[in-house]
Image (cartoon, helix red, strand yellow):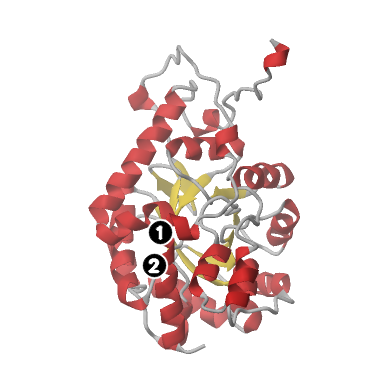
Amino acid sequence: MTKENIAERKNDHLDIVLDPRRACSLVDPGYAALTFEHCAAPELRLDDIDVRAVLFGRTLSAPLLISSMTGGAARATQINRHLAEAAEALGIALGVGSQRIALETGADQGLTRQLRQLAPSVPLLANFGAAQLVAGYGLDEAQRAVDMIEADALIIHLNPLQEAVQTGGDRDWRGVFTAIEALALRLQVPLVAKEVGAGLSPAVAQRLLEAGVSVIDVAGAGGTSWAAVEAERTQDPRQRAIATAFTGWGIPSAQAIARVRRACPGAYLIASGGIRDGIDAAKAIRLGADLVGQAAGVLDAALVGPEAVIEHFQVLIEQLRIACFCTGSPDLVALAQAPLLPPFDPSGL
């Protein structure tokens, strides 16, 4: 695929994701089914609640990651700059979109060391796809991706469904675990394994950890559906029909978090996929997440400027803090144990 074709595809992705009606998964992420037990007497001072978290040795002011976004070559530079400035001001982590174009063509889309200059104190996560790793990427490309932005870690994104329904997608995924393991052994920064909206199962999460991955991002279904995005992109009725059938595919986010946490009790987990607000973030932490990621929900703000991104996340953080307050949780450790109401059964009254 040429530089122009890749850039055109990324630009299409951005246009489609900006319209939730075209990109949203038909899967319910599952957060609405959970209800915290309200604490009417929290014995806390709201301003004292501690929502700090740690990622790769860096302290975050809140357990948040601006998740990887895609963007066309012309717009991505501005988006990345806005996100980096906002991440630094907020004290939260930032994962960049795929660096494939930058690695293969030199069109850096703003993914340069200037990003680290804009965000010197927060975790930055580099990113490329597992499909590229299987197809021949190795230590050289991984180190270049990390060095490009002086990243703290490298995301390997797993998107087999998207590749399968995409015209010209990468369809040979044989050897993916072997390739990840080989890279984990040699790369000097940690690896993050991230799905892109269809969820990670406990079995796959366990195999990734065994292969040397340090952090798991379950990226469950319920947010952006990349099958829906590819269905919107294609002009081929046959390809559209194939992709559309999978717009309801995937492991709901809430289930993915809970199941992976049970199977991998010591793992560092990121929850993304369908996070709408700070209450969803609180529920994700209650289910076992260490960090919560959001991408599409902040994309509109990212196009406007860093101030809009900051305001967006300030609202989410305040919602999270109030959720802690109203569950009697002084910090995230306590929130992870906050009581949930059982499913309501009027026949049991």
- Tell me if residue 190 comes above or below residue 175 in the rendering: above
Q: Are the residues at dot 2 and dot 1 in contact (C-beta closer than 8 Å)?
A: yes
**Residue 172 location (% of width, % of height):** 70, 79
Tell me, yes or no, if residue 310 can be seen here.
yes
314 to 199, vertically: above or below: above
Q: Residue at x 60, y 49 (%)?
A: 27
The kind of residue tagged 2 is Asp
Q: Residues within 10 Å of mark 2 (few under 14, many from 20)?
A: some
Residue 289 location, quadrant: top right
Residue 144's spot in the image, x, y percent?
47, 79
Kindly identify which residue carries mark 1.
19
Q: Is residue 89 visible?
A: no
Q: Which mark is residue 110?
A: none
Residue located beneath label 2 in the image: 15
The picture places residue 16, in percent across and down from the top left corner, at 43, 65
Q: Residue furthest front?
A: 237
Give the CA separation, mark 2 to mark 1: 7 Å
* Residue closer to the observer: 71 or 306: 71
Q: Which residue is located at x 55 percent, y 54 percent?
A: 25
Identify which amino acid the numbered label 1 is placed on. Answer: Asp
Residue found 59% across the figure and 52% down from its top: 221
Q: Quadrant of residue 132?
A: bottom right
Q: Residue at x 34, y 54 (%)?
A: 87
Judge whether 349 appears above or below 321 on screen. Answer: above
Q: Secondary structure at mark 1?
A: loop
Q: The C terminus appears in which quarter of the rendering?
A: top right
